Image: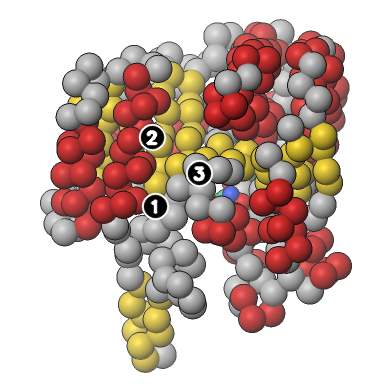
Amino acid sequence: MKIIVLPGDGIGPETMAATVQVLQAASRRFGLGLVLEHDVAGHESLRRHGATVTPALLDKVRAADGLMLGPMATYDFKDEARGEINPSKFFRKELDLYANIRPARTYPGMEQKVGAFDLVVVRENTEGFYADRNVESGGSEMLITPDVVVSLRRITRLCCERIARSAFELAMARRRHVSIVHKANVLKLGDGMFIDVCHEVARDFPEVQVDDFIVDAMMAHVVRAPQRFDVIVTTNMFGDILSDLTAELSGSLGLGGSVNAGRDHAMGQAAHGSAPDIAGQDIANPFSLILSAGQLLGWHGQRRGLQAFEAAAHAIEEAVVAAIQAGECTRDVGGRLGTATTGDAFARRLG
Ligand code: NAD
């Protein structure tokens, strides 16, 4: 399996260095034969190539079996004409990575703010309120007058259908419960269609229990009793917001791993951003990116029927549980180690 590794901005280089160590340890232990090819995206690519991402990089990623994308300083990238392209959007759109799978679970030995839970947010990734991926060319946000902006949200039956299917398939391998999160009381057409399509897809999965929640009330439900949820399916922006909440409820945003999956490609990526407030201080939690790497291996294993990859993915998740219990982790999750020593200890433990 060839994986392109792009460290990213802010805490990206520190957390990706730890993740690369872990991937190498997993490759040795499980005989995965991983080939890691390093390149750049974000500020470093802008400096070197005049653009945060380049067509040549996309070709390379297309030809590989997976991509590990570090956190990006997306807020800094304002003008595509000057090469300031949002790399997350770029890969999600170009590779049609429509399903952003964001698990959140609590860990034994850590303070549990809202009790133990284990859930997954399945977020649509290729349309919705994200103006940079809704139209063929340009964006779907318009400056009508200097004082008036109109932002358009795109919702299509196709994207609702495929994200719903991803959620129900995932639920079949878990506790067989899907919760649909929406705002159909106000966005009657778009979210109305989203709910309808989710219920249509549900008919193909009669063993799965289904319920639905309005997104604002969902914020209260998930804080009050996250253990009642298994798989949560929702549109792009709601999923982005909700999954940061569930990651933090699990203990830290630094535990929020994710994989962005399409039919032919996948990208491991932490749920959080470049965290400029802690960059370069050796305190960022690398587990979000390490868990994302585990999810990427799991995706590859499932798609190709390769058990060693699925075993490696499972071992990475189990090793995070054990590392936190042993206190071999960063401060945000109760440990005393730095980013680099957390990576060292984790690679040793996994190996
Ligand atoms: P952020 O997610 O970077 O950080 C939010 C808070 O969580 C900060 O206090 C940060 O220190 C903490 N945090 C994040 N990751 C952590 C980790 N691994 N360990 C410990 N603490 C961690 O959000 P922000 O500060 O609003 O955004 C910074 C930049 O990231 C912006 O440019 C934003 O656009 C971008 N961003 C990128 C992505 C992405 O690449 N997928 C996602 C979200 C935000």
- On the image, numbered disc 3 is attached to which residue? 262
Residue 237: which numbered mark, if any? 1
Mark 3 vs mark 2: which is more N-terminal? 2
Check disc 1: other Cα within 10 Å, few if <14, some if 14-19, many if 20+. some
C-alpha separation, residue under disc 3 versus residue under disc 2: 10 Å
Question: Measuring 36% from the left and 27% from the top, which residue is drawn there?
Answer: 169
Residue 3 seen: yes
Q: Amino acid at mark 3?
A: Gly
Q: Position of residue 311 (x, y in %)?
A: 64, 13
Check disc 2: other Cα within 10 Å, few if <14, some if 14-19, many if 20+. many
Taking depth in this image into account, of 267 and 141 the one nearest to the observer is 267
- On the image, numbered disc 2 is attached to which residue? 166
Q: Amino acid at mark 2?
A: Ser
Q: Position of residue 51 (x, y in %)?
A: 74, 70
Q: Quadrant of the N terminus?
A: top right
Mark 2 vs mark 1: which is more N-terminal? 2
